[in-house]
């Protein structure tokens, strides 16, 4: 018999030049953005309280670097704590709802509704619950923000399995634990990772916004608020930059794990680009 | 050992309360080593019958024995392997991991699994593709993996639900030959659902013709073509005679015609 050697995985390697070619347009946009920020905005007469020039922000960052980095680390810890707490609870909950489907269908409408609730509105309340200086008020807000999208997506991933996939497991007399381990959980991973990426962003938002309603003076959100109230716009923007860099790094590290964990997924194919 | 692998007695399946009768009083015996095709118009219950044999669908009435035990017991004993129209490979498993899945579930240890996977990859001629993921394979190759998986634990019975239905004609004819070679090598019993008359005639030792609404067996055509069959078998006059015979049986069982009730058993 002839196996028409059809081997799409072959073209994995890429030359350095190809890589550079791919990133060049994005790098150019980045450079143009910085130039516009530094020179174009002042030339257009944008006031510094609206947006100070880029270099002033960099200088402000250098002046209070230790403070900002420490603040960033504190807020990031709050975000990470909320992320881990919210996502693991959501995953466990989704497993239970997927295992006992009537329970899932009974709760699903409320979960979807809860997913649409602007959770940050509760931030002042969690301050009242846990104490304004406690990191837990921010961790809980971040956790609740992460919980619903991860729950809804994971549940969708666990239950959107082709009927034949389940019939096949049934034909092997496989039990529920085995079906979860070998079919439902792997099937849910693309959904889970999409949700985790969303959750990483939400966790940072939750932690920073939680800080806005008060917290340890060492936290990033509190520093932004106080810098603005003192008209230190450059410092406020420097803090915002720190928050942005942390948020992007958080998101990127999850994307990296996703890429490794989902290397079997058709979306990783390179030759389709 | 019992020489009847599948025996169905007055098997009836109704979907919903007083709803569609998918199967009506099906009587069928499949002997060891046979290659049986179920053929009929869509809605004749051929896939349902296959699923009843595999204990994936429970019959409303009647009895099904597989290897002399209840279909349920036979499923728990992993007495059959099944292949669907879609390959149903698990995307997150490589070719070898897909093939070894039933072995894992059967508690085989690692080295025995590796040995068997190697044999199976050889059997379906996929050497060099063991580490590939399903999306990296063509449709025909995916279906070969699916067949290897179904055969990996040497089940006595192979159930196939239109396994080549989604493939192009060339691939289908090639896989037909390959399936016959595997059938001869493994000595397994095959129940094969198809809606292609020539495929049914080419592969089978007997063709079971079914009609729709209600789904029942209208004729059983023994196929006396010589074994082993080759590409030339499709050119033989006898092949065309049998194709005609099956086609006429199918038309005789047509929904709008009155057909004399045929005895389903041989």
Image: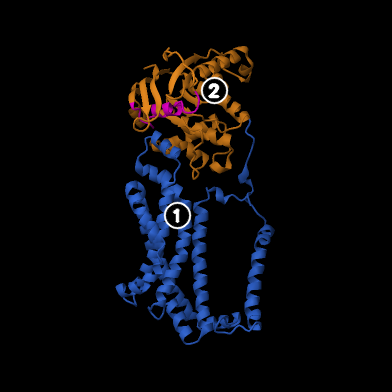
Chain colours: A blue, B orange
- Residue B196 rendering spot, x and y as whole percentages: 55, 24
Instruction: Name the residue tied to disc 1.
Output: A192
If the image is split into quadrants, where does the C terminus of chain B sit? Answer: top left
Instruction: Name the residue tied to disc 2.
Output: B180
Residue B167's disc is: none
- Residue A163 rendering spot, x and y as whole percentages: 43, 39
Q: Residues within 10 Å of mark 2 (few under 14, many from 20)?
A: some
- Residue B197 rendering spot, x and y as whole percentages: 55, 21
Which residue occupies 33% across, 47% down? A102
In the image, the segment drawn in magenta is B40-60
Marked residue chain, label 2: B
Q: Is residue B248 above or below residue A219?
A: above
Q: Nearer the viewer, residue B98 or B116?
A: B98
Q: Is residue A148 above or below residue A246?
A: above
Q: Nearer the viewer, residue B222 or B136?
A: B222
Q: Judge whether residue B49 is colored magenta.
A: yes
Farthest bottom residue in view: A230
């Amino acid at each position: 018999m002839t196996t028409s050697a059809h081997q799409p995985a072959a073209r994995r390697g890429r030359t350095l030049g190809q890589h550079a070619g791919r990133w060049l347009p994005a790098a150019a946009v980045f450079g143009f953005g910085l130039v516009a920020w530094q020179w174009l905005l002042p030339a257009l007469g944008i006031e510094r309280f609206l947006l100070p020039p880029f270099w002033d922000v960099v200088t402000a960052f250098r002046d209070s670097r230790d403070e900002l980095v420490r603040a960033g680390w504190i807020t990031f810890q709050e975000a990470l704590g909320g992320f881990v707490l919210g996502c693991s609870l959501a995953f466990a909950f989704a497993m239970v709802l997927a295992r006992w489907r009537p329970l899932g269908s009974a709760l699903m409408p409320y979960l979807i509704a809860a997913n649409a609730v602007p959770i940050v509105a509760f931030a002042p309340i969690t301050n009242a619950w846990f104490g304004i200086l406690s990191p837990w008020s921010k961790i809980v807000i971040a956790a609740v923000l992460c919980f619903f999208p991860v729950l809804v997506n994971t549940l969708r991933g666990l239950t959107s399995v082709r009927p034949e996939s389940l019939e096949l497991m049934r034909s092997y007399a496989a039990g529920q634990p085995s079906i979860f381990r070998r079919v439902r959980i792997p099937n849910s991973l693309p959904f889970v990772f999409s949700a985790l990426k969303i959750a990483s962003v939400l966790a940072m938002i939750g932690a920073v916004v939680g800080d806005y309603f008060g917290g340890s003076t060492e936290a990033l959100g509190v520093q932004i608020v106080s810098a603005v109230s003192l008209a230190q716009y450059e410092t406020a923007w420097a803090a915002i930059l720190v928050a942005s860099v942390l948020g992007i790094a958080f998101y990127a590290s999850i994307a990296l794990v996703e890429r490794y964990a989902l290397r079997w997924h058709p979306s990783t194919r390179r030759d389709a680009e | 050992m019992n020489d009847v692998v599948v025996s169905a007695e007055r098997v009836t399946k109704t979907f919903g309360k007083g709803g569609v009768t998918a199967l009506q009083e099906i009587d069928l015996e499949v002997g060891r080593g046979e290659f049986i095709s179920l053929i009929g118009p869509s809605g004749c219950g051929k896939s349902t019958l296959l699923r009843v044999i595999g204990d994936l669908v429970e019959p409303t009435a009647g009895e099904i024995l597989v290897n002399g035990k209840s279909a349920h017991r036979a499923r728990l004993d992993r007495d059959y392997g099944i292949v669907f129209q879609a390959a149903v490979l698990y995307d997150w498993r490589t070719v070898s991991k897909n093939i070894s899945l039933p072995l894992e579930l059967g508690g085989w240890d690692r080295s025995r699994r590796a040995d068997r996977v190697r044999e199976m990859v050889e059997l379906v001629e996929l050497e060099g593709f063991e580490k590939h993921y399903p999306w990296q394979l063509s449709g025909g190759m995916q279906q070969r993996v699916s067949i290897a998986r179904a055969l990996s634990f040497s089940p006595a019975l192979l159930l196939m639900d239109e396994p080549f239905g989604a493939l192009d004609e060339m691939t289908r004819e090639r896989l037909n030959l390959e399936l016959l070679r595997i059938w001869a090598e493994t000595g397994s019993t095959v129940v094969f659902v198809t809606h292609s008359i020539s495929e049914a005639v080419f592969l089978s030792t007997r063709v079971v013709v079914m009609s729709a609404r209600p789904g029942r067996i209208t004729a059983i055509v023994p196929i006396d073509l010589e074994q082993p069959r080759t590409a030339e078998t499709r050119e033989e006059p006898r092949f065309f005679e049998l194709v005609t015979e099956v086609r006429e049986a199918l038309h005789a069982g047509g929904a709008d015609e009155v057909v004399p009730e045929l005895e389903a058993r041989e």
